[in-house]
Amino acid sequence: MGALPLVPISALSPSLSTNEFIGAEVRSSDDKIIGEVRNVIFETDDHPAHAIVASGGFFTPGEASIVAPVRSLKATQDRSVFSLPCWRWR
C-alpha cells in the first residue's frame, strides 16, 4: 500500500549497473520472494540478456536457478527490489 509503480528495466534512467543488479532480491507479482540475482548473461546478436536468479529454501539459498529475460523484470523506484511479473509458483 502506498508503493510507487514498478519501472521496466529498459525505462530506468540512468541505466542500471551490474553492481545494483547482482545480489538484488527478486519477487513474484504476488510479492513472494523468488530469490536473488546471481549473474547476468549479456545480450548477443542471437540472444537477449538474461538474469540468473538463485532460488532455494531458507537454509539452502541458491539451490535452484531460474533464467529470466532481463526485459521481463521490473524495478522498484529505488532499484532495491526487482519483480518478475510473469513468474508463477508451481
Image: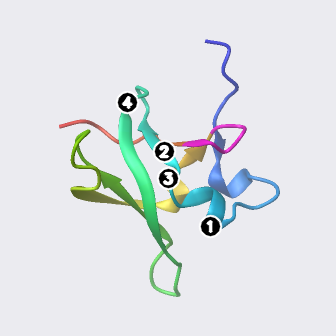
Left or right: residue 60 compared with residue 80: left
Question: Which quadrant is the N terminus positioned in?
Answer: top right
- Measuring 49% from the left and 73% from the top, which residue is drawn there? 48
Tell me which secondary structure the magenta stretch mostly adopts: loop
Query: Which mark is in front, 2 or 4?
Result: 2
Q: Which residues are magenta?
A: 76-81
Q: Which residue is mark 1?
A: 18
Q: Secondary structure at mark 1?
A: helix
Give the mark, 2 or 4, whose residue is nearer the N terminus. Answer: 2
Residue type at tag 4: Lys
Amino acid type, label 2: Glu
Real-space CA distance between mark 4 and mark 1, rounded to the nearest whole angstrom: 23 Å
Residue closest to the far front: 59
Disc 1 from disc 2: Cα separation: 13 Å
Q: Residue at x 74, y 52 (%)?
A: 12
Residue at numbered disc 4: 32
Q: Is residue 89 left or right of residue 4?
A: left
Q: Secondary structure at mark 3?
A: helix
Q: Which mark is residue 33?
A: none
In three-dimensional space, the C-alpha distance between marks 2 and 4, rounded to whole angstroms, equals 10 Å
Q: Nearer the viewer, mark 3 or mark 1?
A: 1
The residue that disc 3 covers is 72
Please report the residue visible at 24 percent of the width from the left and 36 percent of the height from the top. 89
